[in-house]
Protein backbone atom coordinates (compact mmCIF):
# COMPACT_ATOMS: atom_id res chain seq x y z
CA UNK A 1 0.00 0.00 0.00
CA UNK A 2 1.28 3.47 -0.92
CA UNK A 3 1.29 5.92 1.99
CA UNK A 4 2.59 8.82 -0.12
CA UNK A 5 2.07 9.51 -3.83
CA UNK A 6 3.63 12.55 -5.49
CA UNK A 7 2.91 13.21 -9.17
CA UNK A 8 4.21 15.96 -11.43
CA UNK A 9 5.19 18.27 -8.57
CA UNK A 10 6.58 21.69 -9.50
CA UNK A 11 7.58 24.71 -7.43
CA UNK A 12 9.31 27.89 -8.50
CA UNK A 13 10.48 30.92 -6.49
CA UNK A 14 10.90 34.00 -8.69
CA UNK A 15 12.87 32.72 -11.70
CA UNK A 16 14.39 29.71 -9.92
CA UNK A 17 12.86 26.25 -10.43
CA UNK A 18 13.30 24.53 -7.08
CA UNK A 19 11.16 21.47 -7.84
CA UNK A 20 10.86 20.57 -11.51
CA UNK A 21 8.24 17.90 -12.24
CA UNK A 22 9.06 15.19 -9.70
CA UNK A 23 7.07 12.02 -8.96
CA UNK A 24 7.63 9.31 -6.36
CA UNK A 25 5.77 6.94 -4.04
CA UNK A 26 6.47 5.76 -0.49
CA UNK A 27 5.22 2.34 0.54
CA UNK A 28 3.83 1.38 3.93
CA UNK A 29 6.21 0.42 6.77
CA UNK A 30 9.33 1.44 4.90
CA UNK A 31 12.08 3.92 5.71
CA UNK A 32 12.38 6.28 2.75
CA UNK A 33 15.52 8.40 2.42
CA UNK A 34 15.12 11.69 0.55
CA UNK A 35 18.63 12.64 -0.52
CA UNK A 36 20.22 15.71 -2.00
CA UNK A 37 22.73 18.46 -1.46
CA UNK A 38 21.88 21.39 0.78
CA UNK A 39 19.45 23.61 -1.12
CA UNK A 40 18.33 20.86 -3.48
CA UNK A 41 14.64 21.24 -2.57
CA UNK A 42 14.13 18.53 0.05
CA UNK A 43 12.62 20.84 2.67
CA UNK A 44 10.47 22.56 0.04
CA UNK A 45 9.00 19.18 -0.94
CA UNK A 46 8.30 18.30 2.69
CA UNK A 47 6.55 21.63 3.28
CA UNK A 48 4.27 20.88 0.34
CA UNK A 49 3.55 17.42 1.77
CA UNK A 50 2.53 19.10 5.03
CA UNK A 51 0.28 21.60 3.26
CA UNK A 52 2.48 24.51 4.37
CA UNK A 53 3.51 25.51 0.85
CA UNK A 54 1.37 25.61 -2.29
CA UNK A 55 2.66 23.71 -5.34
CA UNK A 56 2.67 25.42 -8.69
CA UNK A 57 1.64 22.17 -10.35
CA UNK A 58 1.13 18.53 -9.42
CA UNK A 59 -0.65 16.48 -6.79
CA UNK A 60 0.34 15.05 -3.43
CA UNK A 61 -1.62 12.28 -1.72
CA UNK A 62 -1.20 10.87 1.78
CA UNK A 63 -3.10 7.68 2.65
CA UNK A 64 -5.19 8.12 -0.48
CA UNK A 65 -6.29 11.68 0.34
CA UNK A 66 -5.30 14.81 -1.55
CA UNK A 67 -2.99 17.22 0.30
CA UNK A 68 -4.38 20.75 0.18
CA UNK A 69 -2.50 23.95 0.88
CA UNK A 70 -3.52 25.51 4.18
CA UNK A 71 -5.50 23.50 6.68
CA UNK A 72 -5.10 20.08 5.06
CA UNK A 73 -6.98 17.14 6.58
CA UNK A 74 -4.15 14.78 5.65
CA UNK A 75 -2.03 16.05 8.55
CA UNK A 76 -4.09 13.82 10.84
CA UNK A 77 -2.01 10.98 9.38
CA UNK A 78 1.33 12.74 9.83
CA UNK A 79 3.90 13.27 12.56
CA UNK A 80 6.58 15.86 11.80
CA UNK A 81 10.07 16.50 13.18
CA UNK A 82 11.66 19.71 11.82
CA UNK A 83 15.43 20.04 11.55
CA UNK A 84 15.52 22.30 14.63
CA UNK A 85 12.57 21.45 16.90
CA UNK A 86 11.53 24.15 19.37
CA UNK A 87 10.27 23.54 22.91
CA UNK A 88 9.24 25.42 26.03
CA UNK A 89 12.53 25.28 27.97
CA UNK A 90 10.85 25.51 31.40
CA UNK A 91 8.87 22.27 30.87
CA UNK A 92 9.90 18.68 31.51
CA UNK A 93 9.52 16.12 28.73
CA UNK A 94 6.36 14.70 30.33
CA UNK A 95 4.79 18.12 30.73
CA UNK A 96 5.52 18.94 27.11
CA UNK A 97 4.01 15.70 25.78
CA UNK A 98 0.89 16.24 27.94
CA UNK A 99 0.55 19.71 26.43
CA UNK A 100 0.89 18.30 22.90
CA UNK A 101 -1.78 15.71 23.66
CA UNK A 102 -4.14 18.38 24.96
CA UNK A 103 -3.59 20.62 21.91
CA UNK A 104 -4.31 17.75 19.51
CA UNK A 105 -7.42 16.63 21.39
CA UNK A 106 -6.09 13.38 22.84
CA UNK A 107 -7.62 12.15 26.09
CA UNK A 108 -5.34 12.65 29.08
CA UNK A 109 -5.21 8.98 30.24
CA UNK A 110 -4.15 7.94 26.74
CA UNK A 111 -1.59 10.75 26.52
CA UNK A 112 -0.02 9.77 29.85
CA UNK A 113 0.23 6.12 28.88
CA UNK A 114 1.54 6.86 25.39
CA UNK A 115 4.03 9.42 26.76
CA UNK A 116 5.58 6.79 29.04
CA UNK A 117 5.88 4.34 26.14
CA UNK A 118 7.55 6.96 23.95
CA UNK A 119 9.87 8.26 26.66
CA UNK A 120 11.03 4.69 27.17
CA UNK A 121 11.51 4.28 23.40
CA UNK A 122 13.64 7.43 23.11
CA UNK A 123 15.65 6.79 26.28
CA UNK A 124 14.29 9.70 28.35
CA UNK A 125 12.08 7.76 30.78
CA UNK A 126 14.37 8.56 33.70
CA UNK A 127 14.99 12.18 32.71
CA UNK A 128 13.26 14.67 35.06
CA UNK A 129 15.16 17.85 34.15
CA UNK A 130 13.84 20.85 32.24
CA UNK A 131 14.04 20.77 28.45
CA UNK A 132 16.20 23.88 28.53
CA UNK A 133 19.02 21.76 29.97
CA UNK A 134 18.80 19.10 27.22
CA UNK A 135 21.49 18.46 24.64
CA UNK A 136 20.72 18.75 20.92
CA UNK A 137 20.42 14.98 20.66
CA UNK A 138 17.98 14.77 23.60
CA UNK A 139 15.81 17.45 21.99
CA UNK A 140 15.80 15.56 18.69
CA UNK A 141 14.69 12.41 20.50
CA UNK A 142 11.94 14.31 22.31
CA UNK A 143 10.88 15.74 18.96
CA UNK A 144 10.42 12.20 17.64
CA UNK A 145 8.29 11.33 20.68
CA UNK A 146 6.10 14.39 20.08
CA UNK A 147 5.72 13.44 16.40
CA UNK A 148 4.68 9.88 17.31
CA UNK A 149 2.24 10.82 20.06
CA UNK A 150 -0.90 10.39 17.95
CA UNK A 151 0.38 7.18 16.31
CA UNK A 152 0.71 8.65 12.80
CA UNK A 153 0.77 6.53 9.67
CA UNK A 154 3.60 8.71 8.35
CA UNK A 155 6.57 10.22 10.19
CA UNK A 156 8.38 13.01 8.31
CA UNK A 157 11.81 14.04 9.60
CA UNK A 158 13.75 16.92 8.07
CA UNK A 159 17.52 16.43 8.48
CA UNK A 160 17.11 14.70 11.89
CA UNK A 161 20.81 13.82 12.34
CA UNK A 162 22.64 16.65 10.55
CA UNK A 163 24.01 18.44 13.65
CA UNK A 164 24.46 15.48 15.99
CA UNK A 165 27.59 13.78 17.25
CA UNK A 166 28.12 10.07 16.40
CA UNK A 167 26.35 8.85 19.55
CA UNK A 168 23.36 11.13 19.04
CA UNK A 169 23.16 10.14 15.36
CA UNK A 170 23.14 6.45 16.24
CA UNK A 171 20.38 6.95 18.80
CA UNK A 172 18.14 8.75 16.31
CA UNK A 173 18.75 6.19 13.56
CA UNK A 174 18.01 3.30 15.92
CA UNK A 175 14.70 4.91 16.87
CA UNK A 176 13.68 5.55 13.25
CA UNK A 177 14.54 1.98 12.32
CA UNK A 178 12.47 0.63 15.21
CA UNK A 179 9.34 2.73 14.62
CA UNK A 180 8.95 1.58 11.00
CA UNK A 181 7.23 -1.50 12.42
CA UNK A 182 4.25 0.77 13.16
CA UNK A 183 4.65 3.76 10.87
CA UNK A 184 6.19 4.75 7.57
CA UNK A 185 9.22 7.05 7.80
CA UNK A 186 10.45 9.71 5.37
CA UNK A 187 13.62 11.50 6.32
CA UNK A 188 15.65 13.96 4.32
CA UNK A 189 19.40 14.04 4.65
CA UNK A 190 22.72 14.62 2.92
CA UNK A 191 24.50 12.17 5.28
CA UNK A 192 24.78 9.12 3.03
CA UNK A 193 26.06 6.73 5.69
CA UNK A 194 22.81 7.27 7.62
CA UNK A 195 20.84 6.25 4.55
CA UNK A 196 22.85 3.08 3.99
CA UNK A 197 22.27 2.08 7.57
CA UNK A 198 18.46 2.19 7.84
CA UNK A 199 16.75 3.03 4.52
CA UNK A 200 14.69 0.60 2.46
CA UNK A 201 14.07 3.03 -0.41
CA UNK A 202 15.63 6.28 -1.60
CA UNK A 203 15.08 9.17 -3.99
CA UNK A 204 17.93 11.48 -4.99
CA UNK A 205 16.97 15.09 -5.72
CA UNK A 206 19.35 17.13 -7.88
CA UNK A 207 18.71 20.50 -9.51
CA UNK A 208 14.98 20.13 -8.93
CA UNK A 209 14.66 16.66 -10.45
CA UNK A 210 14.75 13.13 -9.09
CA UNK A 211 17.76 11.56 -10.76
CA UNK A 212 17.55 8.18 -9.04
CA UNK A 213 14.86 6.41 -7.02
CA UNK A 214 13.89 2.94 -5.85
CA UNK A 215 14.80 0.11 -3.52
CA UNK A 216 18.24 0.85 -2.07
CA UNK A 217 19.61 -2.67 -2.40
CA UNK A 218 18.34 -2.96 -5.97
CA UNK A 219 20.03 0.34 -6.84
CA UNK A 220 23.32 -0.86 -5.36
CA UNK A 221 23.07 -4.04 -7.42
CA UNK A 222 22.32 -2.00 -10.55
CA UNK A 223 25.42 0.12 -10.06
CA UNK A 224 27.45 -2.80 -8.78
CA UNK A 225 31.17 -2.59 -9.33
CA UNK A 226 33.96 -3.45 -6.98
CA UNK A 227 36.79 -1.31 -5.72
CA UNK A 228 40.25 -2.65 -5.06
CA UNK A 229 42.23 -0.48 -2.65
CA UNK A 230 45.99 -0.89 -2.98
CA UNK A 231 48.62 0.70 -0.77
CA UNK A 232 52.22 0.29 -1.80
CA UNK A 233 55.26 0.57 0.44
CA UNK A 234 56.77 3.34 -1.68
CA UNK A 235 55.68 5.53 -4.56
CA UNK A 236 58.41 3.86 -6.65
CA UNK A 237 56.68 0.48 -6.17
CA UNK A 238 53.41 2.05 -7.28
CA UNK A 239 55.04 3.50 -10.40
CA UNK A 240 56.53 0.12 -11.33
CA UNK A 241 53.09 -1.47 -11.01
CA UNK A 242 51.32 1.27 -12.97
CA UNK A 243 53.94 1.16 -15.74
CA UNK A 244 53.04 -2.38 -16.78
CA UNK A 245 51.30 -2.62 -20.15
CA UNK A 246 49.09 -5.49 -18.94
CA UNK A 247 47.08 -3.30 -16.56
CA UNK A 248 46.75 -0.05 -18.52
CA UNK A 249 43.04 -0.62 -19.20
CA UNK A 250 42.39 -0.89 -15.45
CA UNK A 251 43.95 2.49 -14.78
CA UNK A 252 41.25 4.35 -16.72
CA UNK A 253 38.81 4.05 -13.80
CA UNK A 254 41.38 4.51 -11.05
CA UNK A 255 42.30 7.32 -8.72
CA UNK A 256 45.68 7.87 -7.10
CA UNK A 257 47.05 9.54 -4.00
CA UNK A 258 50.75 9.26 -3.30
CA UNK A 259 51.48 5.54 -2.79
CA UNK A 260 47.76 4.61 -2.67
CA UNK A 261 45.38 3.78 -5.51
CA UNK A 262 41.82 2.57 -6.02
CA UNK A 263 40.89 0.36 -8.98
CA UNK A 264 37.21 0.19 -9.99
CA UNK A 265 36.09 -2.84 -11.96
CA UNK A 266 33.16 -5.13 -12.82
CA UNK A 267 34.79 -8.40 -13.88
CA UNK A 268 35.91 -9.45 -10.42
CA UNK A 269 37.74 -12.75 -10.98
CA UNK A 270 39.54 -11.61 -14.14
CA UNK A 271 40.68 -8.32 -12.58
CA UNK A 272 41.90 -9.87 -9.33
CA UNK A 273 43.90 -12.46 -11.27
CA UNK A 274 45.39 -9.76 -13.51
CA UNK A 275 46.42 -7.61 -10.53
CA UNK A 276 48.11 -10.51 -8.76
CA UNK A 277 50.04 -11.39 -11.92
CA UNK A 278 51.08 -7.75 -12.25
CA UNK A 279 52.47 -7.74 -8.71
CA UNK A 280 54.66 -10.70 -9.64
CA UNK A 281 55.72 -9.19 -12.92
CA UNK A 282 56.71 -5.87 -11.32
CA UNK A 283 58.41 -7.68 -8.41
CA UNK A 284 56.48 -5.59 -5.86
CA UNK A 285 53.94 -6.50 -3.25
CA UNK A 286 51.56 -4.03 -1.58
CA UNK A 287 51.41 -3.23 2.11
CA UNK A 288 47.64 -3.38 1.86
CA UNK A 289 45.25 -5.00 -0.61
CA UNK A 290 41.54 -4.61 0.19
CA UNK A 291 38.41 -5.34 -1.83
CA UNK A 292 35.54 -2.94 -1.15
CA UNK A 293 31.93 -2.86 -2.36
CA UNK A 294 30.55 0.12 -4.25
CA UNK A 295 29.29 2.63 -1.69
CA UNK A 296 26.20 4.80 -1.87
CA UNK A 297 28.53 7.80 -1.79
CA UNK A 298 30.16 6.73 -5.07
CA UNK A 299 26.78 6.06 -6.66
CA UNK A 300 25.48 9.44 -5.47
CA UNK A 301 28.48 11.26 -6.94
CA UNK A 302 27.96 9.49 -10.26
CA UNK A 303 24.31 10.51 -10.63
CA UNK A 304 24.71 14.15 -9.56
CA UNK A 305 27.71 14.96 -11.78
Image (cartoon, rainbow, N blue to C red):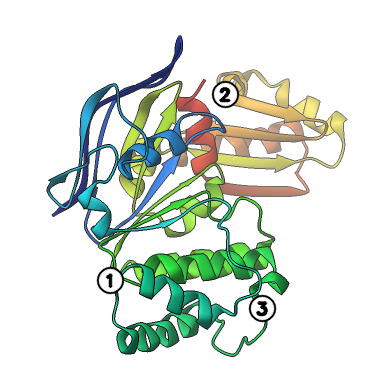
- Can you tell which of label 2 and label 1 is closer to the viewer? 1
State the SS at label 2. Answer: helix
Q: Which residue is mark 3?
A: 130
- Neighbourhood count class around disc 2 (C-alpha, 10 Å): few under 14, some 14–19, many 20 upward: few
The x and y percentages for residue 95 are 52, 80
The x and y percentages for residue 164 are 66, 58
**Which image quarter: residue 234?**
top right
For the N terminus, the image quarter is bottom left
Query: In the visual, does 176 lie left or right of 253?
Result: left
Q: Nearer the viewer, residue 98 or 274?
A: 98
Q: Which residue is mark 1?
A: 182
- Can you tell which of label 1 and label 3 is closer to the viewer? 3
Q: Is residue 147 above or below residue 200?
A: below
Q: Is residue 290 above or below residue 147?
A: above
The x and y percentages for residue 228 are 60, 41
Q: Are marks 2 and 1 in contact (CB under 8 Å)?
A: no
State the SS at label 1. Answer: loop
State the SS at label 3. Answer: loop
The residue that appears at 22% across and 26% down in the rendered structure is 58
Q: Are marks 1 and 3 in contact (CB under 8 Å)?
A: no
The residue that appears at 29% across and 21% down in the rendered structure is 56
The x and y percentages for residue 100 are 42, 70
Lower sequence index among marks 2 and 3: 3
Q: Which residue is mark 2?
A: 253
Q: Is residue 254 above or below residue 234?
A: above
One can see residue 107 in this view: yes
- Can you tell which of label 2 and label 3 is closer to the viewer? 3
The residue that appears at 50% across and 52% down in the rendered structure is 82
Lower sequence index among marks 1 and 3: 3
Lower sequence index among marks 2 and 1: 1
Q: Nearer the viewer, residue 9 or 230?
A: 9
Amino acid sequence: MSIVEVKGLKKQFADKKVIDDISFTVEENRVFGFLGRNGSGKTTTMKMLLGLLQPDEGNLNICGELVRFGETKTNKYVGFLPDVPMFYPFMTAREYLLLCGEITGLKQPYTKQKSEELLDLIGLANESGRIGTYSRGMKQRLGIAQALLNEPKLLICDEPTSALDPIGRKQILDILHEVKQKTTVIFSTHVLSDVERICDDIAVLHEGKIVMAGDLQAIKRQYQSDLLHIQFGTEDDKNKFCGLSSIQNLLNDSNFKEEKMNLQFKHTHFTEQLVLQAFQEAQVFPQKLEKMEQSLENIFMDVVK
